[in-house]
Amino acid sequence: MRAQPEVTTHIQALAIDKALFGAPAMLYNRPPMGKANKKAKAPSATIAQNRKARHEYHLEEHFEAGLVLEGWEVKSMRAGKANLSEAYVLLKDGEAFLFGARIEPLNTASTHITPDPVRTRKLLLHRRELGQVFGGVQKAGFTCVPVSLYWKKGFAKCDIALAKGKQKFDKRATEKERDWNRQKQRLMRQG
C-alpha cells in the first residue's frame, strides 16, 4: 500500500506560516525583499516652450491643439529635439498650421527618408475652437502664437494662444516686476 501525500489547504498554509513566523504571510503579491526604492521622478510632459512668445506678447486665450506628425518626428520629440522659438500659427482655408517649428531628426530613426525639420504641420482643433481663433485674428486684431509642446495621454499637443503684441514699455515693466519679485525672495530667505 502506497503512502498518501499530505494535502494542505490555503487556510492551513496560512496557519502554518503564522505559527512559524509570527505573522500571517501573503501567498500572493509579497513585497520585494531588500530596501524599498524611492519613487523616481516622472519625466516632464513638456517637450518645448516658446519663451519668446511670453516675452513679446500678452497671452489672452489658450487652446489645446493636436499635431499631425510623422513617425520620425514623434521619436525626435520624445528625445527632446523640438524647438518653437521661430514658430508661428498660420491660418489658411479654415485650417490651422504650425509653421517654422523645428524638430531635429534622429540619425537612427530617419535613415530611409529625407526628413524636413521645419516642415509645416497641421494643427487639429474643433470647429468651434477654429472659429474662435479665426474670429480673434480677423476681427479683434490678435496674433496666434504657439506657446508650448507637451505630451498628454501619449499624444503630442500644442498649446496655442491668442495674443496682443507688447510695447517696449510693457516689456520693461514686466522685467522690473520680475526683478522685484526676485529681490523679495532673496530678502525673505535672508531675513
Image (spheres, rainbow, N blue to C red):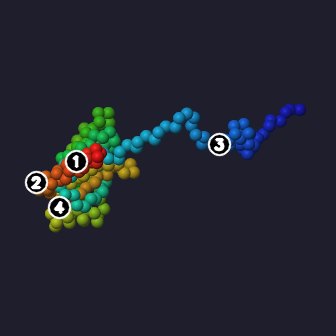
| Secondary-structure class at tag 2 | helix
Q: Residue at x 83, y 36 (%)?
A: 4
Q: Which residue is mark 3?
A: 26
Q: Which residue is mark 1?
A: 183
Q: Residue at x 80, y 37 (%)?
A: 6
Report whether 151 appears left or right of 25.
left
Residue 112: in sight, yes or no?
no
Q: Give coordinates of residue 126: x percent, y percent.
A: 30, 62
Disc 2 from disc 3: Cα separation:
68 Å
Please tell me how crowded label 4 is: few (under 14), some (14-19), or many (20+) other residues with Cα within 10 Å. Answer: many
* Displayed quadrant of residue 61: bottom left
Q: Residue at x 16, y 66 (%)?
A: 140
Mark whose residue sits in front, 2 or 3:
2
The N terminus lies in quadrant: top right
Q: Amino acid at mark 3?
A: Met
Task: Pick whichever, 108 or 33, lies toward us.
Answer: 33
Report whether 132 appears left or right of 44.
left
Q: Residue at x 32, y 39 (%)?
A: 79
- The answer to the question of whether label 2 and label 3 lie on touching residues, with beta carbons closer than 8 A, is no
Sequence order check, earlier mark of 4 and 2: 4
Disc 4 from disc 2: Cα separation:
18 Å
Disc 3 from disc 1: Cα separation:
56 Å
Sequence order check, earlier mark of 1 and 2: 2
Q: Amino acid at mark 2?
A: Lys
